[in-house]
Image (cartoon, grey):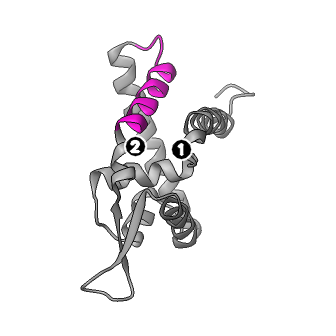
Amino acid sequence: MEKNKSIGRIVSCIYRFTAITLHKKLEKYNIGPGQLYFLMVLYRNEGINQEYIANKLMIDKATSARAIKKLEEEGYVTRKIDENDKRAYNICLTKKGYYLKPIVLKILREWTNTLLTDFNEKEKKTLFELLEKLLKNANRGIEKSE
């Protein structure tokens, strides 16, 4: 690999640019990029518990609890005690949370299109395959270090 090339730096820059862009576009809804990903999981799996969301997003339970609390305070979700496990909460979208779905999807689609400008279909497919492989390797690296 070339001397001054760093995967970490590139990924970090893309992450920061994404966070900046999403923050600007979501500001008027009083949510940040962190909460956005929780909404995306809920749009696909409503009524799941906090632990499932944390696992799905590969984040710790405390971070998950804070993000869900913020979404609840803003009126986007409600927490309901799980009937099978009284210690767990299931997270459900409110009408306000559902209202935001097309807005959120549009914001994400536009940002994805911006990132993929000048990529042909084959390059897009290859990019996603390589990023998935990178993610698996990163996850394995974390597991080894624990």
For image coordinates 48% across by 64% down, the residue present is 72
Occupied quadrant, residue 2: top right
Counting from the top left corner in percent of width and height, residue 24 is at 62, 34
For image coordinates 58% across by 40% down, the residue present is 28
**Residue annotated with mark 1:** 29
Occupied quadrant, residue 47: bottom left
Q: Toward the viewer: 136 or 56? A: 56
Label 2, secondary structure: give it.
helix
The label shown at residue 44 is none
Q: Toward the viewer: 70 or 55? A: 70
**Residue annotated with mark 2:** 100
Counting from the top left corner in percent of width and height, residue 117 is at 48, 14
N-terminal of the pair, mark 1 or mark 2, is 1
- In magenta, the rendered stretch is 102-119
Q: Is residue 53 above or below residue 5?
A: below
Q: Amino acid at mark 2?
A: Leu
Quarter of the image where the N terminus is located: top right
Occupied quadrant, residue 19: top right
> Does the magenta stretch mainly form a helix, a strand or a loop?
helix
Q: Is residue 75 above or below residue 104?
A: below
Q: Is residue 48 above or below residue 23?
A: below
Magenta segment includes 110: yes
Give the class, few, some or many, for how many residues have Cα within 10 Å of label 2's Cα (few <14, many ≥20): some
Counting from the top left corner in percent of width and height, residue 57 is at 45, 57
Label 1, label 2: how many angstroms apart (C-alpha)?
9 Å
